[in-house]
Amino acid sequence: MDSTEKKRNFSRKREAILKAVRSTKCHPTAEWVYRTLKPDYPDLSLGTVYRNLAQFKNDGTIVSVGTINGQERYDGNVTPHTHFVCSSCGAVIDIPGRLIDEAQVEKTAEEMHLRVDSWDVLMHGICAKCLHGK
């Protein structure tokens, strides 16, 4: 395999990893992305998935919702929104809209003499499925 073929193969895997994260609302883990893509990319390694997710996160292409049940969860939706994490099953659910607006953040930063580079809201509790035993 020449270097052009390796680069093209790497680019295809990289694009597939990003597409996998962006195409689901489950807020996937690296392992979920790996299991999803492995049938179509037999030479894909879990290390490749982790490296690409880290790079996408650093670039701002995706965001990390945080570590839930020991695994980092990702979101391809980078528009500002709130997440709800179920303490029982670990589900991560998007809450549409902004619960805190930019003016509130700026006011708090000014009052506390802070520079805020980014912000998010993360709620914890029990999801509807767990509450109702479904």
Image (spheres, rainbow, N blue to C red):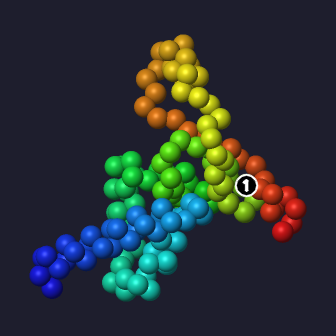
Q: Quadrant of residue 115?
A: top left
Say what secondary structure mark 1 lies in: loop
Specify few, some or many for label 1: CA neighbours under 10 Å numbering under 14, 14-19, or 20 or more. some
Q: Specify whether 118 is left or right of 99.
A: left
Q: Position of residue 27 (x, y in %)?
A: 56, 60
Quadrant where the N terminus sits is bottom left
In the image, residue 37 lies at what x, y percent?
44, 78
- The residue singled out by tag 1 in the image is 87
Q: Position of residue 9 (x, y in %)?
A: 25, 77
Total marks drawn? 1
Q: Relative to 93, is 12 on the left or the right? A: left
Instruction: Give the camera-side residue of 4 and 66.
Output: 4
Left or right: residue 72 compared with residue 62? right
Q: Residue furthest right?
A: 132
| Residue at left offset 51%, top offset 21% | 106
Q: Position of residue 25 (x, y in %)?
A: 58, 61
Under mark 1, the amino acid is Ser
Residue 2 visible somewhere in the drawing: yes
Q: Residue at x 54, y 13 (%)?
A: 111
Can residue 112 be seen here? The reply is no
Asked if residue 26 is positioned above or below residue 95 in the image, the reply reads below
